[in-house]
Amino acid sequence: MAEVIFYGLAGCPANAKQKQQLAAAGHTLVERDLATADLTAADLRAFFGEREVDGWFNRRAAAVKSGAVKPEALDETAALAAMLADRELIRRPLIQVGDRREAGFDPTTLHGWIGLTSGESCDDKHARGQCDHGHQHFVKAPAA
């Protein structure tokens, strides 16, 4: 399995669940605190790939929800400066395996990239009436 560098925020319940999923899939986690990590603008930029600037942001951040920060109005330089000043603005987690970097926890992308399996799919959760449509969805292992 992979060694996964995982940048998250302490106390974030979603990040805690995401780390559990990665560990359950057999990956080794190297945890880094996003709030204190020594990241430059270039380091941070590498996690966003081809995404549009407004897709780099955590839409649940207080400054975004209040309208104090308007991601769609920022260029790359301003967005990176804002995110380095207020780490809550960063779409998380930031994940690195080898040279590849990604922002956000997309189970389908992760499953295709490094493998992410669990015993319970979104459909299974729906059947129990307990799917919250958050970022904690589990991907079913592909049929052998």
Image (spheres, rainbow, N blue to C red):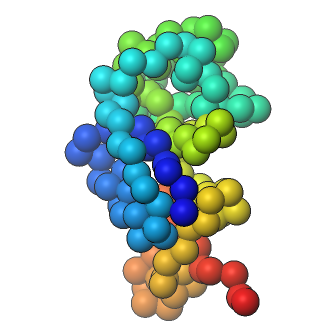
For this view, does 59 lie left or right of residue 107?
left
Q: Is residue 138 above or below residue 17?
A: below
Q: Is residue 126 visible?
A: no
Q: Tell me the residue at 69%/81% (across/down).
A: 142
Q: Nearer the viewer, residue 54 or 109?
A: 109
**Percent position (x, y) of residue 87?**
38, 25
For this view, does 56 lie left or right of residue 64?
right
**Percent position (x, y) of residue 19?**
38, 57
Q: Tell me the residue at 60%/80% (across/down).
A: 140
Q: What is the quadrant of residue 117 in the picture?
A: bottom right
**Percent position (x, y) of residue 125?**
47, 83
Q: Residue furthest left?
A: 11
Q: Nearer the viewer, residue 65 or 107?
A: 107
Q: Tell me the residue at 61%/22% (across/down).
A: 45
Q: Is residue 86 above or below residue 128?
A: above
The total of numbered circles placed on residues is 0
Q: Is residue 109 visible?
A: yes
Q: What is the quadrant of residue 115 in the picture?
A: bottom right
Q: Nearer the viewer, residue 35 or 25?
A: 25
For this view, does 143 lie left or right of residue 110?
right
Instruction: Name the image quarter holding the C terminus.
Output: bottom right
**Percent position (x, y) of residue 54?**
63, 28
Instruction: Name the image quarter holding the N terminus.
Output: bottom right
Q: Is residue 64 above or below residue 118?
A: above
Q: What is the quadrant of residue 13 in the picture?
A: bottom left
Q: Residue furthest right?
A: 50
